[in-house]
Image (spheres, coloured by chain):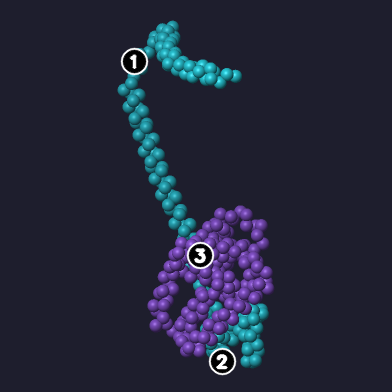
Amino acid sequence: MNQNEFILMINPFKDKLFRLAKRLLVSHEEAQDATQEVLVKLWDKKNGLEKYSSIEAFAMTMTKNYCLDQLKSKRANHLKIVHSNYVAKEATLDQATEDNDSWNWVEKMINELPDQQKLIIQMRDIEQYEFEEIAKILDMNETAVRVNLSRARKMIREKMNKTHAYGIS
Amino acid sequence: MELAKIEQLVEKYFDGETTLAEENELRTYFSSPRVAPHLEHYQSLFQFFVKEKEAQFSPSILQKTKNKKPMIGLGLAASMVLFAGLLTFLHFNGKAQNESVSTADLGQFESPEEAFEETQKALALLSSNVNVGMKSVNYINEYQNSKKLIFKK
């Protein structure tokens, strides 16, 4: 496989990897690094990729594992993730449009979910994967994915209703 | 689309039982301007999902590989220049040495017999010196002797 073939192969899903990494790592830069890292790993393995039924699913699993490892090592070091872009968003909150404002709320709520649920929301509601694919990527069974998804969605709804009741958003 | 159906879908959605097609229906409904007031607060959720899918992995992997190539070229060029310099240096140096040390200075022998004798002399000198060295090492055998005294086999 040469460079061009590789790029053609990863093009359909490289943005998905990035968005998944961003969902977990929050920071734009860290997500870029993680995606780059995963793509480099994929490139190193390029000759053994035929044996995977879906390279996309494989890459998503790699991204998930890489990001969780990153988070683990960060938490172990008592370091907080530096998410500068997040702060920047907060700063512009004032001038943000009404829409943008409520999107930020949604994003915040999703960020407060456990990692597993973040992953599932990301893959189902944003990337629109089938349950079967999510189950494969996360190495779970489909029922567990559904249960977790429902839990995550209800959690978001609950928080949304709360903010609505307070009249914040 | 009738409201009852949407409400039903929203319920199903939160139970995690909607299919992708149904979720798409919800998306289109919530991105339309006429959303029922009591469902309005879900609007931002679905709009957020649509918006989030647009984020792209911007620093293309292409850039990196492109940056690498000229670096390799530069390295190659540098090493070639270095190599050429080294070659010319060695070449001229070698030449200079060859010129300064002519065959006469090395004291060549005219006849093969003479040369053979001189070589033998040189080798004898070397071997005698090696034997001197060996003598001084001989005392190590003393250890062996005393060891034999102590550990009688």
- Residue named by callout 2: B38
B143 shown above or below B34: above
> Looking at the rendered structure, which numbered label has been put on residue A71?
3
Name the kind of residue labelled 1 in the image. Ala
Q: Is residue A130 left or right of residue A66?
A: right
Residue beneath disc 1: B104
Which x, y percent locates residue B100?
31, 22
Contact, CB < 8 Å: mark 3 with mark 1?
A: no
Q: Quadrant of residue B12?
A: bottom right
**Which x, y percent locates residue A159?**
53, 82
Q: CA distance from mark 2 to mark 3?
A: 39 Å
Q: Earlier in the sequence, mark 2 or mark 1?
A: 2
Q: Chain of mark 3?
A: A
Residue type, numbered disc 3: Leu
Q: Secondary structure at mark 2?
A: helix
Q: CA distance from mark 2 to mark 1?
A: 112 Å
Residue B1 pos. (x, y %):
63, 90
Q: Nearer the viewer, residue A14 or A116?
A: A116
Q: Which chain is purple?
A: A
Report crowding for label 3: few under 14, some 14 to 19, many 20 or more residues within 10 A (C-alpha).
Answer: some
